[in-house]
Amino acid sequence: MLAPTSFFLDYGCHIRILEEARALLAQGMEVRIVTYYLGRNLPDLDIVRCAPTPWRSDYEVGSSRHKIAFDVLLSWKALWTALRWRPHLIHGHLHEGALIGKVLATLLRVPLVFDFQGSMTGEMLDHGFIKEGSVAHYWWRRLEARIVEMPDAILTSTIHSAELLDHVFQRTENVYPLPDSVNLDYFTPTCLLPEDRQAQRAALGIPAGRQVVVYLGLLADYQGIPQLLQAAAWLRARDYAVSFLLGGFPGVEHYRRQAADLGLTPQDVVFTGKVPYETAPQHLALGDIAIAPKLSATEGSGKILNYMAMSLPVVAYDSPVSREYLDNLGVFAAPLGDAAALAEALASLLRDPDKGRAAGVRLREYAARHFSWERTGRQLLQVYEKLW
């Protein structure tokens, strides 16, 4: 596996890489993950890291131009590893992983699988790196189209992404929707006793008697964090007894200042910072309602599945990806990016906690039927076998 990111960090695509690798190991396969210099090692995974950039060894890579240097270093490490280990298949995550993987797969004469987790140019637009309709947008889209042509098979994290590959890039052959899944034995609402739940809420400064809206993921504008804070201010201005518990990184201080500018107190919005994946269930168990205000129309949103497994009612913007996970069991806000609509969706659950609890139970049952990593591992192996 090629993972062009600082694997492992406790969010998003990292969790998909982690759980796919574990699912393949459970199927009896050997998996070696080649990734960037920084990140957290995990005891059950074989992880190989590239060299750091010479000018700054502690650089945390996000969506940045520094990724070009890291991808060069990753390419050399991947080539060295592939020539020594001789894998039977290359599984490239993200577009850079597919591009590097194509070179290795051609050299070794093995199949290449591309794990497509959203449009590369769509993400660049979300992050403000390019402007729609610009010359840069045109050339990046052409590169993305070329990368999409390269693999022997493409896995998509959502059905919506498979449809995007068809409609935008005209790629339909050997495209397999493989939605994100969740470990329901790990993410379980019984992971905290009621007395521990109350004690941890109090320790975080959440006043007794308040309902808690919980979020766990990256803190970024494209994740809808500004709209989330505006919704929190809307609710507090109308005297809803609610606190928001936000777990994630980076930008904690930035969003803490933004919350203060909206008149929200530390009791109204609690920022916990980075939450390790190992303690994510306990963090989510502190909530009564979960929120997923992501603004991207192309990326997956695997956090929703964790919310569902925890039997939490989920409020999300009405997008194809959210509907794909939640079906008709979520509470949806429209239009995308409207903070007042998000607040009103939350208010409908805050006014009727019993409705929320019943929705949460149905969501966990739905996740158990449709989103299992064990099933994902079997599907991955079937895709590989078709290529071999």
Image: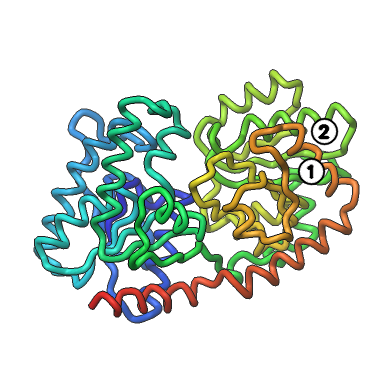
Identify the element where label 2 is drawn: helix
Is disc 2 in contact with disc 1, using a CB cutoff of under 8 Å?
yes
Q: Is residue 321 left or right of residue 384?
A: right
Q: Residue at x 34, y 51 (%)?
A: 94
Mark 1 lies on a secondary structure that is helix
Residue 225 visible (yes or no): yes
Image quadrant holding the N terminus, namely bottom left
Q: Which mark is residue 334?
A: none
Horizontal arrangement in the rendering, residue 175 relative to residue 88 (left or right): right
Residue type of the residue flagged with mark 1? Leu
**How dense is the environment of label 1, judged by Cα within 10 Å: few (below 14), some, or many (20 and up)?**
many
- Position of the C terminus, as image quadrant, is bottom left
Q: Position of residue 110 (x, y in %)?
A: 17, 69
Q: Of the numbered discs in the image, which one, if any, rests on residue 235?
A: 2
Q: Amino acid type of disc 2?
A: Leu
Residue 15 appears in the figure: no
263 and 226: which one is in front? Answer: 226
Determine which quarter of the picture holds residue 323: bottom right
Q: Which residue is mark 1?
A: 346
Is 316 rendered above or below residue 342? below
**First in sequence: mark 2 vs mark 1:** 2
Task: Report the side of 240 relative to 3 (left or right).
Answer: right
